[in-house]
Amino acid sequence: MTEEKVIELLSRIQDPFLHKSLVESGAIQELKVKEGYVSLKVALPQTGSQEQMMLQQEIVNTLKGAGVESVGLRFEERKPVQGSQQQAAAPGVPPLLAPGSKTQFISIASGKGGVGKSTVSVNLAVALARLGKKVGLIDADIYGFSVPDMMGITERPKVVGETIQPVERFGVKVISMAFFVEDNAPVIWRGPMLGKMLMNFFSEVNWGDLDYVLLDLPPGTGDVALDVHKMLPKSKEIIVTTPHATAAFVAARAGSMALKTDHEILGVIENMAFFESKITGEKEYVFGKGGGERLSDELGVPMLGQLPLGQPDINEEDFAPSVYARDHRLGQAYEDIAQNIIDQLN
């Protein structure tokens, strides 16, 4: 028995209150499969009811009928939104975007490409997951998608019923345009089609219950960035730059756009701040100094961190070319930034 098989079985069982499958309604909060044992946590609009008892019996019978030896089942109550269930709060609105959603959105932006924005997005998402948070990562850089490759993801999302199951890696649920094109083909689309694809990442994907969703935005202030600002009016933002004066100058445009659309900027991350020799410990400021500080002063936001140049240690058995291990110097730096963000948002 595999997780995929369990999800397939549960997709045939209907939520008695929302009249959708348990998978489609997002009722499955936790799922663990191990040696003939399946553990499940299911969220329902109403617990302790006759419907719950009947659903419990149907789940157990279905799983045991498929060969599962033992089923551990817990129920929790979905919190109502304005007197109704979250799914029913606004017809047609994806659960992540519903008014009562507790998920916090963090957009990772930059003024130009090549500053390490995707590397920051990936490692920040992994760091938040390591701190015990439930995290989703949307590779919204639809032309320059790179997140799956950076995280060493080789599988593709599975479709269960009418919803897409995001791929999970390092405890982070990931969706990317890379999953939907063949052989690294270019995406030749215009603005409206990009916006539609981005909305599908919210509406067609079964994210489940998340604390944070990070969005790796395309560089600059183009169509996708504008769509994100419209879709997620309460999204927070992090601006990534290098110390170079020009990079910081261009990044200020992304910050200005965030402020004009009422997005709160959490802070600035200065990437590639310096190179430190392993032999002498001497620091070389390859891209200059001061760009991050100037940008944070201009935007009136804190400097979240200054990250040095450094290659992650490559593990051929668990290949992820851009993810720093937890005990790596940069892995710890990302975890410090992640804790800072958690503290700010709390």
Image (cartoon, grey):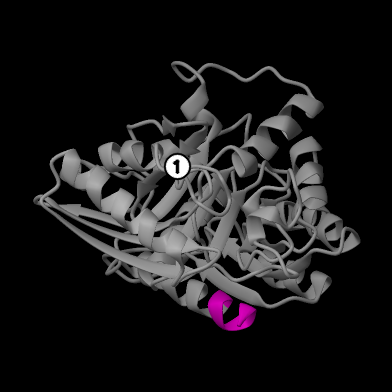
Q: State the extent of the magenta-drawn residues as a range.
A: 341-346
The answer to whether residue 234 is left or right of residue 213 is right
Q: Residue at x 41, y 33 (%)?
A: 157
Eyeballing the image, is 24 above or below 156?
below
Does residue 255 appear anywhere in the picture? yes
Q: Is residue 343 magenta?
A: yes
In the picture, measured across the screen, residue 316 lies left or right of residue 118, that is left
**Hey, which quadrant is residue 172 in on the image?**
bottom left
Secondary structure mainly formed by the magenta segment: helix
Q: Position of residue 254 (x, y in %)?
A: 78, 53
Left or right: where does residue 193 sit relative to residue 151? right
Q: Can residue 240 be seen from the camera position used here?
A: no
Percent position of residue 188, x then y: 68, 17
Q: Measured along the vertical axis of the image, is residue 88 above or below residue 298?
A: above
Marker count (numbered):
1
Q: Position of residue 243 (x, y in %)?
A: 63, 61
At horizontal 78% and vertical 75% (from top left) the residue drawn is 297
Question: Is residue 308 rendered to the left or right of residue 292?
Answer: left
Looking at the rendered structure, the kind of residue marked 1 is Pro
Q: Is residue 256 magenta?
A: no
- The front one of 6 and 234 is 6
Helix, strand or loop status at disc 1: loop
Closest to the observer, 303 or 276: 303
Image position, residue 60 (x, y; %): 25, 52
Question: Is residue 14 depicted above or below 237 in this figure?
Answer: above
Residue where numbered disc 1 is placed: 166
Query: Residue reaching furthest front?
Result: 50
Disc 1: CA contacts within 10 A as few (<14), some (14-19) or many (>=20): many
Residue 322 vs residue 134, the one in the foreground: 134
Task: Give the quarter of the figure containing the C terminus.
Answer: bottom right
Q: From what the image shows, is residue 203 above or below residue 288?
A: above
The foreground one among 43 and 106 is 43
